[in-house]
Amino acid sequence: MKMSKIGLVIGREYMSRVRKKTFILLTILIPILVVGLMFLAMWLGIEKTKHVKVLVADPNGLCEGEIFIGQDENPPATFYFYEDFVDSADFAGRADFQEYDVLIALNPEVITNKKIGGLYREQPNSETTTYIRNKLELRLEEYFAKHKGVPLETYREIRTPTHFKLKALDDSPDKELQEIAQVIGLVFSIFIFIFILVYAAQVMRSVIEEKTSRVVEIIVSSIQPRKLMMGKIVAVGLVGMTQFLIWIILISVFMVVLQSTIFPDFSDPSNWQGIAETGNVPGQIQTAMETSGERSIWADAIYHHVDWVALIILFLIYFIGGYLLYGSLFAMIGSAVDSETDTQQLMLPVMMPLMFSYLVSIMIMGNPDGGTAIAFSHIPFSSPIVMLQRVATGTVPFYEVLISLALLIATFLMTTYLAGKIYRVGILMYGKKVSWKEIIKWIRY
Amino acid sequence: MEMLRTENIVKQYAGHKALDDITISTKKGEIFGLLGPNGAGKTSLIRIINQITGPDSGKVYLQGKEIKREDIARIGYLPEERGLYKKMKVKEQALYFARLKGMSKQDAKKKLEEWFEKFEITSWYDKKVEELSKGMAQKIQFITTVIHEPELLILDEPFSGFDPINTELIKSEILRLKESGTSIMLSTHNMNSVEEICDSIALINQSKLVVNGSLKEVKERYRTHTYAVQFKGLMFGFANALFASFALEHSEQIDEDRAIAHVKLLKGNTLNDLLRTVMPVVEIEAVNEVIPTMNDIFIRAVKGETEEGGDENE
């Protein structure tokens, strides 16, 4: 079977890269690192909210030996009751009290002076402290309700929190949600920035390698220089895609394997404090502080607000577009120099828009639909980095994405065309230190 | 039969002309030498023939038909700046080059085995190029140039950079390929090898074609009508007899009464006239025409001297 020449070039470039030890190592190590860090973060998170045993000294039996726990709650503390006074010496010394972390004194005067005090062995975190306080307060309120003749069921119904939400008139999403979505978008921007830089630099290095090993003239006597360059760019791009794909697969597999074997509890989202959403079960009592506001908004943003499918698809499209644009420029530079050390001066004008886009994407945080953001998400040299961040907020009209993509495609067609012309001349030019002025002249050769 | 013809090739690079109206033609089955000093435009012309760059104007014909992209499969090219992928295995690399030239994988494998067996280097298959010595890499380089059995072989400075043993090997391979019908074009500085193996030459100097033709024709054209006369007698008498019709270029004494004198015929005089003039004075032992070497021709052409007898008279 005869392969097309560009196919042969792609095949060689691709195989020589994916067989490299560094590629294999990186492709396997990154998912291990990512999954490892994720589990480390989870593990640290769980460690922080260590379950606390609370001993409630309730000589008058105000609590009647129980505290109401909602059915979907994940309490950071459990309450135990002791129907007598417990003093600090007993709590410190008595063997049967050693298992409790916190002692709460519910003195009879609490009905009148509303003062509750306690002791801890090791300070519980603020979340747990708040939880303990809320539960006890609630229990006291229930006590009052009962004594004022309100049935417990009625009281609990009254106490069910109201879901309150303000919505913008023009249906634009919540500002806070948008900001979180933009942070997620920024992460994508940074990824695109890094990947474009890494893979475009690989193209450049590969061009320089072919030039310095003097193999390039033999190759271009068999295949047009433009095709050789395109084959190289496509192959490196495919290597990048392969790496993404393997990462996604490996990360998923590692997650599943770890979840089902080593840490079955960790990966259950209900164990992650606050990230799990609190459902609205009738009859369940929630206090306002129970789940911290920030966290539930994060969860809301991650689970409902961000359109992951669109984001990932656009990530790939913009990565390809941006990579082709910058890859061709880097190939151009590679063709013009004799060694990698000569690239620095030529790199500056190419690196500048890339670095600048990165800065813009940080600058427009909080204002994803401002003039700067709109402008730079259309300029092809910055759109791959800036647009994703805006897309994540979900406020970008579809036509803007189309315009930005059309401009990006038109530009990379132009840059690959020009790069091809320059590449053709550059690869056969040895021993000459060139400037951009010189390079521009080559277009007309 | 004509193999390759370039017609009025012009190539201009920002401000300087690399090739100025170059028209050359090579015959099928001959070895054609493309000569010229550094920077004359040889490599530019070779790159245009290989379709690596295009001419600004002018055309290239292969066996009478204007050259097309597909024709590169019929050409084998060894550039002056040559090398191999250092990290790639020898066999994979050779196969890659062969397939780029349009060979199928099977054919390429078969041919490769033939060549490797011929050069007795089959043990190198799985070696990376960086593990080979320079001489070994040169052999691989040559194989990759000829593996697809090109009709036209273009070698840019084939003898530079090769060690003497490989130079001999390649010279004999070039001659063997010629025997089997391959047309060869080579550029070189090495005038000895031109005399040894070239049938025709073209000399380019400062972007222009200066000399062109078969080796015999060129030598004929660059005749200086100078003869080496070996005689017995007095040098003084010999020189005096020459008078104005002949010029004594130089002379050397062999022993006490014998010498060799290089004499140039002037003003339409013939060898017979020369002999008639000097016979009364000395005893002639031998007469040979002084044929210019390619080296002489090269230097004279580059210095801009005219053909046919140099710059003295006319």
Image (tube, rainbow, N blue to C red):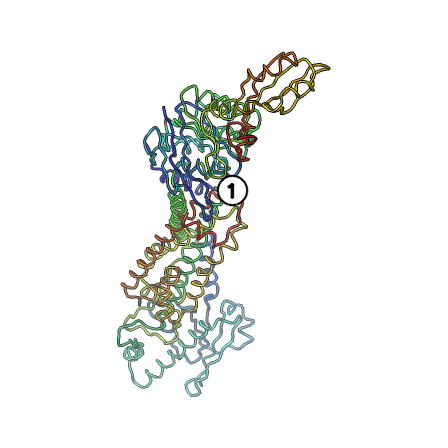
Farthest residue, direction bottom: A112
In this picture, is A201 found above or below B266? Answer: below
In the image shown, does A363 or A287 lie closer to the viewer? A363
Image quadrant in which the N terminus of chain B is located: top left
The chain containing the residue under callout 1 comes to: A
At a point 48% along the width and 62% down the height, the residue shown is: A44
In this picture, is A270 found above or below B102? Answer: below
Residue flagged by tag 1: what amino acid is it? Thr
Crowding around mark 1 (Cα neighbors within 10 Å: few <14, some 14 to 19, many 20+) is: many
In the image shown, does A112 or A441 lie closer to the viewer? A441
The image quarter containing residue A371 is: bottom left
Picture mark count: 1
In the image shown, does B119 or B36 lie closer to the viewer? B36
> Can you give x and y, in whole percent of width and height, for residue A22 in the image?
49, 45
Image side of residue A311 versus residue A263, left or right: left
In this picture, is A424 found above or below A53? Answer: above
Image side of residue A85 versus residue A391, left or right: right
Q: Regarding mark 1 in the picture, which secondary structure is present there?
A: helix
Q: Is residue B90 visible?
A: no
> Can you give x and y, in whole percent of width and height, for residue B75 in the image?
39, 30
> Can you give x and y, in whole percent of width and height, for residue A267 in the image?
40, 57
Q: Which residue is mark 1?
A: A212
In this picture, is B110 found above or below A379? Answer: above
> Can you give x and y, in whole percent of width and height, for residue A220 in the image?
42, 39
Q: Is residue A204 visible?
A: yes
Farthest residue, direction right: B256
